[in-house]
Amino acid sequence: MSRQLIDLILHYTDAQAGHGPYVTPIADVLILRSDQEKPPTHRLFAPAICIVAQGAKCAVFGDRSFEYRAGEALIVSVTAPSLGRVIQASSAEPCLVMAIALDLALMRDVAEGLHVLDSMSADCERGVLVTDFTGPLSDCAVRIMRLFDTPQAIDTIYPLIMREMCFWLMAGPNGQRIAELLVGSPSGKRVREALEWLRHCFSQTVRLEQLAAIAQMSTSAFHRQFKALTSMTPFQYQKKLRLIEARRLMTSEGINAESAAFRVGYASQSQFSREYGRTFGEPPRRHIRNFSIGEFANLSVDDGPEPIQLRNRDTSNVKH
């Protein structure tokens, strides 16, 4: 990875207060820095490209694990629950990550211009991959970092750099896979619409037939494609969303376990406690008692995958 990028991130984070993630003058860009390896943390991963300048991280989506190291980037095209951790970091060489929200409309425009979708694979789409991020791609990241010093240039220059980054991603050896990941087939887009509906309505009782109807598929075809996209079944996905949101309600808003369980859609407190314990390692009351709100805040933003605040900017076709 470019030494320039490492130095720019170190310089930027050294000048910031707190432990991150560090907001930047560009709303779609966050910087993460970890000076030590961290235990796994459940997070909700937003569509983003996460570039490792130094160190290494690991993200688990359902039954699939992805390690991404210096000179690599994790690309996530759907909002998905994950288990992430920093696996290589030290005070001398901290883990440095640049996370950039994906503009899916821009990705689609670049892909169409390159004609990389002309031979779209018929295989079930995946929602996550790791790719090399060196050479001209690294240079794009360096130029984005340098824009922080000239905020008046961001509105004009940043979209151009992102368009160039999309070009190099899709013109590279993994271009076809990346295009399929980010743009998707017509059937894949319908699965994503159902996923977005589920993400907004996760506290409701949902039947597989409802989701399949949104995607205009049979239940078996929808189930298969949803699992290929997220590495989990629709109901595993819904359960993870519920539990992550319940944890947020208890830690950030001070809501008790019973109220949090009800808010996220659980009718049975005992079922909520069992599933919470399986996911987070201990029952909700004990889990919350062992951490202050401040400690949880640090844990949630620094130990897990990149935060959900990185927004998907192509939601105009989502059905509610």
Image (cartoon, rainbow, N blue to C red):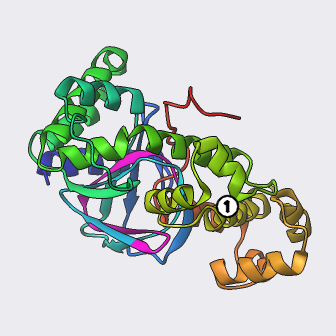
Residue 297's spot in the image, x, y percent? 63, 60
**Quarter of image, res 148:** top left
146 horizontally vs 4: left or right: right
Question: Which residue is at 24% across, 34% downward?
Answer: 166
Q: Which residue is mark 1?
A: 238
Residue 264's spot in the image, x, y percent? 80, 59
Work out which quarter of the rendered image holds the N terminus and state it.
Answer: bottom left
138 horizontally vs 281: left or right: left
**Of the residues shown, which amino acid type is indicated by label 1?**
Gln
Residue 98's spot in the image, x, y percent? 33, 48
12 is higher (above) or lower (below) than 236: above
182 horizontally vs 295: left or right: left
Of 80 and 204, nearer the camera is 204
13 is higher (above) or lower (below) than 143: below
Q: From this viewpoint, is residue 199 visible?
A: no
What range of the chain is rendered magenta?
45-64
15 is higher (above) or lower (below) than 320: below
Question: Which residue is at 36% across, 37% downward?
Answer: 183
Work out which quarter of the rendered image holds the C terminus and state it.
Answer: top right
Secondary element at tag 1: helix
